[in-house]
Amino acid sequence: MRFNQHLAAVILVATFAAGFNSPARADAEEYSPADLATIKSYTLTTDFLEKWTAMNQDPNVLACHVDALTLRAETIDDRAKEYEARPGVHAALAAHGLTARDVVLGTTNIAVAGLQALREKRSWLDDDSAPLPVSAANVQFYREHDAELRQLNEISRQRSREDRRKKKARCPG
């Protein structure tokens, strides 16, 4: 299995099993070697997780502003620009001390670390394909914050359901 196929599995695993609404890339296009290196060199922190959780919990932030699985830009930087250009996202990020680039890199790393942790538990997911672009430290971070990430997933899912019920889920733009 090539990396882009693993990435599709990452998005599914992260979103449906242990994840959250993530601006991680959901299509099957290849990442550039520079982007792969950038992803792998990014370090997940408790500070990022706390800010991202707060943004997800903020009643003034539409759930669709934290659900960015439809990003289609070719590079991490362009993906961050695309995410931030959505109406309301810039203000939501600023209110929580985040940048679009941090969200793209942070959520991508959480998703990839989640897949790596799952690969280590489930031998059928681990084949002879290329290694995932994630550091051992980020996989350990994922394991150590598993409960928080599951809670964040539940918050995101609940917010999305509430927004749909209130017809509030339609983001401008």
Image: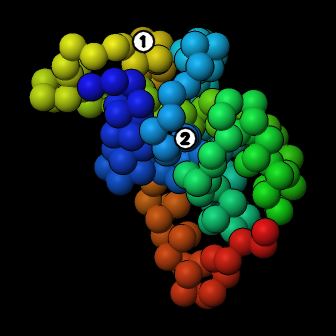
For the residue pair 143 and 92, the one nearer the viewer reads as 92
- Residue name at image x 26 percent, y 31 percent: 118
**SS state under label 1:** helix
Cα separation, mark 1 vs mark 2, equals 21 Å
- N-term-proximal mark, 1 vs 2: 2
Horizontal and vertical percent position of residue 137:
47, 13
**SS state under label 2:** loop
Q: Does residue 122 appear in the picture of this structure? A: yes
Horizontal and vertical percent position of residue 153:
45, 54
Q: Does residue 137 appear in the picture of this structure? A: no
User: Mark 2 — residue?
Assistant: 25
Q: Where, by quadrant of the figure, is residue 121 drawn?
A: top left
For the residue pair 29 and 99, the one nearer the viewer reads as 29
Horizontal and vertical percent position of residue 71:
63, 48
Q: Amino acid at mark 2?
A: Arg
**Does residue 170 sit above or below 15 in this rendering?**
below
Q: Is residue 69 left or right of residue 124?
A: right
- Residue name at image x 40 percent, y 19 percent: 132
Q: Amino acid at mark 1?
A: Ala
- Residue name at image x 47 percent, y 17 percent: 133
User: Mark 1 — residue?
Assistant: 136
Q: Which mark is residue 157?
A: none
